[in-house]
Image (cartoon, rainbow, N blue to C red):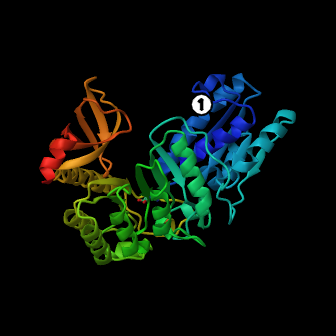
Amino acid sequence: MNVYDSQLVAGLLQQCGYNETNDMSSADVIFLNTCAIREKAEETVHNRLESIQYLKKQKPHLIFGVLGCMAQNIKDDLLESKPYVDVILGPDSYRRIPEIINSRNKKNMHKVDTRLSKFEVYEDLFPSRQGGINAWIPISRGCDKFCTFCIVPFTRGRERSRSLDSIVREVEDAVSNGFIEISLLGQNVNSYRTEGGGFADLLKTISAVSGVKRIRFMSPHPQDMNENLLQVMSDHDNICNYIHLPLQAGSDRILNRMNRTYTRCEYLNLVKKTREYLPDCSISTDIIVGFPGETEEEYLETLQVMEEVIFDRAFMFKYSSRPGTKAAEYTDQINEAIKQNRLERLIKLQHSHTLKANLRHVGKILKVLVEKGSKKSSFQWTGRTEGNMGVIFNKSDEKIKDIVDILINDAKGISLFGSRISEKELMNEIN
Ligand code: 5AD
Ligand code: SF4
């Protein structure tokens, strides 16, 4: 979402006559787009702020702004302790950028706008995308779920869906600019709702846009999954056979304390249902360890769920206390060494599961989207499966952006290795 927002801001700056540069020291305007989801993300930003302070001293006319969730969250601190920050804008205030830049050029003053909107979805603004294969397209903004660990409902505000027409227009625009894979984005994509319908209807509509070879989405919330959505996924070839389904924890007590609104059993049933509709569906997840009060037994329940599901991939985090959230007030916080130890064991288990999940593909023919030349050899391509796994195979007559049939021969670490199957061979295989 932040990559997209940065592209949106780049588009607005272009309207003011600015061009993008990769060289910070030559920039006249620097906006730092920030994330507040975990403390580590905030630390990174603090380090960056220091280095930009130095640039600002050398170049006083430089306009320097902090954007996004951290700007929203710690604006008072920034105003007090970072006087060299000229502009502070929360995630709903980017439309003000042209006006702010123009007025700043006349008069040196701080500009702060962190009002959250119930309506802003940047409906008619398109981002400045560099060429590529995959275009991120937000379908909603904000979140109303209020998981007790999460800062997002506070920094990004209330959940609102973007109109179907505007999404379709952006998809068409992306396709006309050469993008063939569309990744629909939202804090909870499957709670998308407008007068034009819900998330499953949106998927059907996007699936019919000419030139869209692949559709991905992230992230759905287990609470809002339904069979209609699984049916639509199964009915449409260009919707990837892949779901990112955040589990967070495997213990009912912890799930309840996290306000995740589902039980371990409901989650496992959902995985079962998903595999009934989509037998080869890849499933990835997010997991947090060391949530306040999590006992060793409760942590082991998370590992048990992982053993039952065998996720293709997982994004794994140590719980990070976010001031202002409910969980930050819990008095039974877990110490850092225990969190670290739990994370390391979790990562180790997941590595073995990723390999296991990948080995299941050996001997199968998968649809692979050719993305780029392999780093290791100029005679090989790297492509992606629908499940978003990297596949390396020898080059023949295919081109970047083609989807080709690859027979998977081997799996090592997180990579798959295969060889191209011609249409003739594929027909023989099918018959
Ligand atoms: N600490 C650790 N991980 C978090 N996430 C969200 N908030 C926190 C937090 N306070 C993780 C969740 C979410 C992912 C995007 O980030 O797993 O699904
Ligand atoms: Fe955060 Fe929960 Fe909303 Fe996801 S669903 S953004 S974890 S509050």
Residue 209 lies, with reference to residue 264, above or below; the image says above
Residue positioned 19% across, 40% down in the render:
421
Q: Position of residue 347 (x, y in %)?
A: 27, 51
Relative to residue 257, is residue 416 depicted above or below? Answer: above
> Residue 188 at what x, y percent from top left?
49, 64
Asked whether mark 1 and ligand 1 are closer than 8 Å, the reply comes as no
- Is residue 242 visible in the rendered structure shown here? yes
Between 315 and 199, the one nearer to me in the picture: 199
Decide: is 381 above or below 114: above
**Circle 1: element type:** helix
- In the picture provided, is 120 more to the left or to the right than 42? right
**Quadrant of the snapshot with the C terminus:** bottom left
Residue nearest the observer in this picture, 229 or 248: 229
Q: Please report the residue visible at 45 percent of the width from the left and 74 percent of the height from the top.
A: 259
Left or right: 171 in relation to 105: left
Q: Is residue 123 left or right of residue 184?
A: right
Q: Residue at x 50, y 70 (%)?
A: 191
Q: How many marks?
A: 1
Q: Nearer the viewer, residue 275 or 149?
A: 275
Residue 185 coordinates in the image, percent (x, y): 50, 56
Image coords of residue 405 (percent x, y):
24, 44
Q: Amino acid at mark 1?
A: Ser
Disc 1: CA contacts within 10 A as few (<14), some (14-19) or many (>=20): few
Check disc 1 and report the residue beneath it. Answer: 51
In the rendered view, tell whether residue 28 sits above or below residue 403: above
Is any part of residue 408 visible from this angle? no
Can you tell which quarter of the image residue 220 is in? bottom left
